[in-house]
Amino acid sequence: MSAQEALSRFPHLLTPGKLAGLTLKNKMILPAMGTNYANNDGTVSQRFTDYYVARARGGFALIVIEVAAVDPLGKAVGNEAGIWDDYQIPGWKKLVEELHSHGAKVFLQLHHAGRQTSAAVIGEPPVAPSPIPCPMVQELPRELTAEETWGLVDKYRDAAVRAKAAGFDGVELHGAHGYLIAQFMSPDANKRFDEFGGDFIGRMKFPTEIVKRIKQACGKDFPVTIKVSGDEHVHGGRAIQETRAVARQLEEAGIDGIEISLGSYASLAYISGPGGAMPPGYNVDHAAEVKKSVKIPVIAVGRIADPFIAEDILQTGKADFVAIGRAAIADPDFPNKIAEYNLGEISPCLGCNQGCMGQVLDPEIMEVGCLVNPFTGFETDRAILSTDTPKKVMVVGAGPGGLATAWIAAKRGHHVTCYDKEKILGGQFRVAGIPPGKQDLLKAIKYYVTMCNKYGVEFKLGVTVDAALIKAEKPDVVVFATGSTPRTPPVPGVEKVELIGAVDVLEGRKKVGQKVLVVGGGMIGAETADFLSEYGREVTIVGRNPILAKDLAYNNRYFLIDRLKEKGVVALTGAAVTELAPGSVTFTRNNVSQTLSGFDSIVAAWGLTPNRALAEEIADSVDVVHVIGDAVKIRSAVQAIAEAAKVATTI
């Protein structure tokens, strides 16, 4: 479809819009999202630059650069960007000039974490309007004096002056997600009764004074916008009706635009709602409510990852612009691909939260990544460059790791054949997309297959690869993405029980009775229980780990546990199975042995074991052998696809 035809399909999304005197070339905004890519002194790193340049080149009309601390004591993470000192201006200036060269307008988000940081990050106790700990961080903050509060107002002003000097087109105040400005505005966090608290006007004094002082210092024509949570989702916090009043007060103070988000650290799961648990555009109605109260532009955000939904938001007047957040992490070219009507090649956001929420499955890595797009944060290091020496590449396994390897290697010019013993593509990812709310995972498979077909990957399905086949094919490179197989521990009595595999349940190969025992409390067991309870089964989970579904991303786990409780699933965690018998299980929990019986079916979800025997067998007979994903070690798809990209870009 031509660009003109795309414009006829998305007339609101692709046409220019006005924001505070600026003309934006389309209505897609990259919202501020912390990457933790900056240098420790708050200056701009090359990796930071590469990330934003990719998205400016990708067609976003306005790029709001992530949280930049107005004070080093306001940093939320160690490598947060900063705008607290003049020495940081040159780096920002260079970045802004490069982003401008790609046709994007650029704002800088001014930030102070308040109580939502820790002494480990800033070197001393955090500060806040009141000495009330953040429920998530749980460090007791020091209460700011009125004099210190006025001093912080000036620090926001000074930061804006530096941003203007660096060439930014405007600034955005971070007044959402429970950070310092939000804390002053929230009746939950602000218990003061001086000029900065006590009632609505008092709570609004801090943000309105910041706006006024920035306008005085930078000029009325210098755009200042703000991001606020429509609903904090906290008992005693601010809800949408008060947020409408907040928006009106900010408009009167001189704010030029407002982005409506959701939640705080105390309700972290709602900030980046997972796919399935939270519907697309789950926060748009809050933006629509605020739009009733103000004349300034309103920006909607929250799982807006589909161009048809984005167009509808604008067409129905619920917002003036859409902020494309995690979908931009998944594909920096999101706007350009829409403009070209090349929708099938948009790398999809799955709402999985496995990479964009700071690699939450690996506490040692607190930086943004993406499950589907392994090039996020590695825009230069993992570039897909054409090869001068095309090789015959054999990929064994057509799960996400294998498919990612195949299309990337093929795009580089290698001759790639992908094998799988199943007659259908997708591997365990296809099965993982079956439980309730997990259907977005199937988007990744469809995307990878689209890219494989585009670059000429040959598929051989229903073929079991062995050493003889590899010898006959004579590949230059073999990549084993063979995944894993279900594990059955040697529990007494296991041989007497008809165990049903979790995969067999999800794929509909075996039927279960009404009362079901699921053995295994990891992600697979919990999601299988969710699936079974959705269809009216009475489910009990017995798992060794004290935490149910510990291997699931925090946001997704939060809503899964909620659903299991709502549907009456019994979860016995910290329970080590000691014996199985037909219809019963014996386990030790809290040093007490217990037996449960009366089950019609027992489902095995004990976990997985790497499937790499063939890789070890042929290691000496092929010039180059790579093993990736679960075939190396049982981990998440984030690691498997990252390894796929590393291998495919270096073959």
Image (cartoon, rainbow, N blue to C red):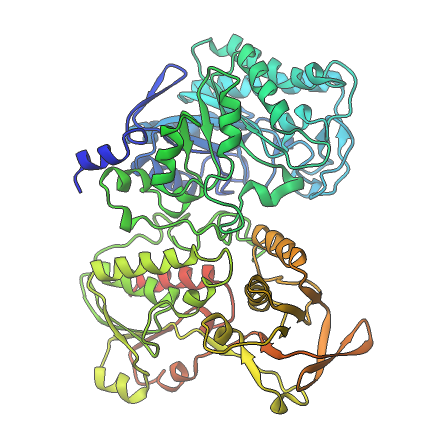
Q: Looking at the rendering, in which quadrant would you find the N terminus?
A: top left
Which of the two residues, 431 or 224, is positioned nearer the viewer here?
Answer: 431
> Residue 63: in sight, yes or no?
no
Position of 240 compared to 98: left or right?
A: right
Position of 194 compared to 355: left or right?
A: right
Which quadrant holds residue 417?
Answer: bottom left
136 is higher (above) or lower (below) than 213: below
Residue at left 37%, top 55%?
443
Q: Position of residue 530 (x, y in %)?
A: 58, 62
**So how many labels did they put on this image?**
0
Which of the two residues, 568 or 422, is positioned nearer the viewer here?
Answer: 568
Which quadrant holds residue 110?
Answer: top right
339 is higher (above) or lower (below) than 492: above
246 is higher (above) or lower (below) than 305: above
Which quadrant holds residue 121?
Answer: top right
Residue at left 38%, top 72%?
481
Which of the two residues, 350 or 400, is positioned nearer the viewer here?
Answer: 350
Residue at left 32%, top 86%?
466
Q: Position of residue 356 (x, y in %)?
A: 49, 48
Q: Position of residue 622 (x, y in %)?
A: 29, 81
Q: Looking at the rendering, in which quadrant would you find the C terminus?
A: bottom left
> Residue 36: in sight, yes or no?
yes
Residue at left 71%, top 38%?
134
Taking the view exactly as shown, the residue that stands out farthest to the right is: 592
